[in-house]
């Protein structure tokens, strides 16, 4: 099983950014925990603050991997291009969010990713990524 976690803008600031919403651990540290928890899964991680780079990465892995776990962050609510990329690839995509976006500002209630995603997991903190991995394991 080969999965790619793709994180969007500002998620490189986890551990520093709004710890009351996003927690106090960096994603790099959490990623190590995921690798230990799922040793039989080949996990890879990519992060970018740039929309086009995220689209490029989705296209790059979207025909060869078993799954993509995508937290497009703020681009979830603004990027038709990322939504189209998710629809264009064959690899199933699970949309994840650390916070419950429906408890936040109204503009965060709309996702351009969800219509093309296999599923959506939100509001469980970093455990949202665990749940997404488990969804691929059946």
Image (spheres, rainbow, N blue to C red):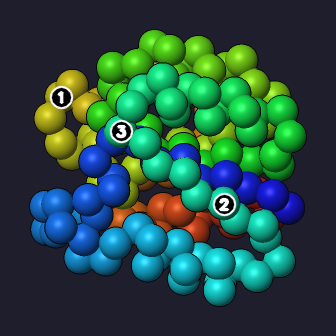
Residue 120 visible to an observer of this rendering:
no
- Left or right of 131? Residue 97 is left
Instruction: Look at discs 1 and 2 and give the one toward the viewer.
Output: 2
Residue with the mark numbered 3: 49
- Left or right of 130? Residue 110 is left
Give the residue displayed 53% in from the left and 62% down from the top: 129
Q: Residue furthest bottom?
A: 36
Q: What count of labels does the image hold?
A: 3
Residue with the mark numbered 2: 44
Give the residue displayed 66% in from the left and 39% down from the top: 93
Q: Is residue 61 above or below residue 128?
A: above
- Is disc 2 placed on a helix, strand or loop? strand
Give the residue displayed 75% in from the left and 25% down from the top: 89
**In whole angstroms, how far apart are the C-alphas of marks 3 and 1?**
22 Å
**In whole angstroms, how far apart are the C-alphas of marks 1 and 2?**
32 Å
- Is disc 3 placed on a helix, strand or loop? loop
- Left or right of 105? Residue 71 is right
Tell me if label 1 and label 2 are in contact, CB under 8 Å. Answer: no
Q: Is residue 135 above or below residue 76?
A: below
- Is disc 1 placed on a helix, strand or loop? helix
Chain-order first, disc 3 or disc 1: 3
Residue with the mark numbered 1: 106
Chain-order first, disc 1 or disc 2: 2
Q: x, y (%) of residue 8? A: 41, 42
Residue 107 visible to an observer of this rendering:
yes
Is residue 100 or residue 10 the one in the foreground? Answer: 10
Sort mark 2 into few (<14), some (14-19) or many (20+) by Cα contacts within 10 Å: few
Is residue 103 or residue 128 the one in the foreground? Answer: 128
Quarter of the figure with residue 112: top left
Give the residue displayed 31% in from the left and 77% down from the top: 25
On residue 57, the disc is: none
Is residue 46 or residue 1 the one in the foreground? Answer: 46
């Amino acid at each position: 099983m080969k999965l790619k976690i793709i994180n969007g803008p500002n998620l490189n600031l986890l551990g520093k950014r709004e710890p009351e919403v996003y927690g106090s651990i960096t994603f790099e540290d959490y990623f190590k925990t995921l690798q230990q928890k799922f040793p039989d899964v080949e996990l890879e991680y990519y992060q970018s603050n740039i929309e086009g780079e995220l689209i490029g990465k989705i296209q790059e892995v979207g025909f060869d991997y078993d799954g993509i776990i995508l937290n497009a962050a703020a681009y979830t609510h603004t990027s038709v291009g990322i939504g189209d990329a998710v629809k264009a690839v064959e690899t199933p995509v699970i949309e994840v969010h650390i916070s419950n976006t429906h408890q936040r500002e109204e503009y965060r209630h709309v996702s351009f990713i969800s219509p093309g995603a296999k599923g959506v997991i939100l509001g469980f903190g970093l455990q949202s990524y665990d749940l997404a991995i488990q969804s691929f394991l059946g």
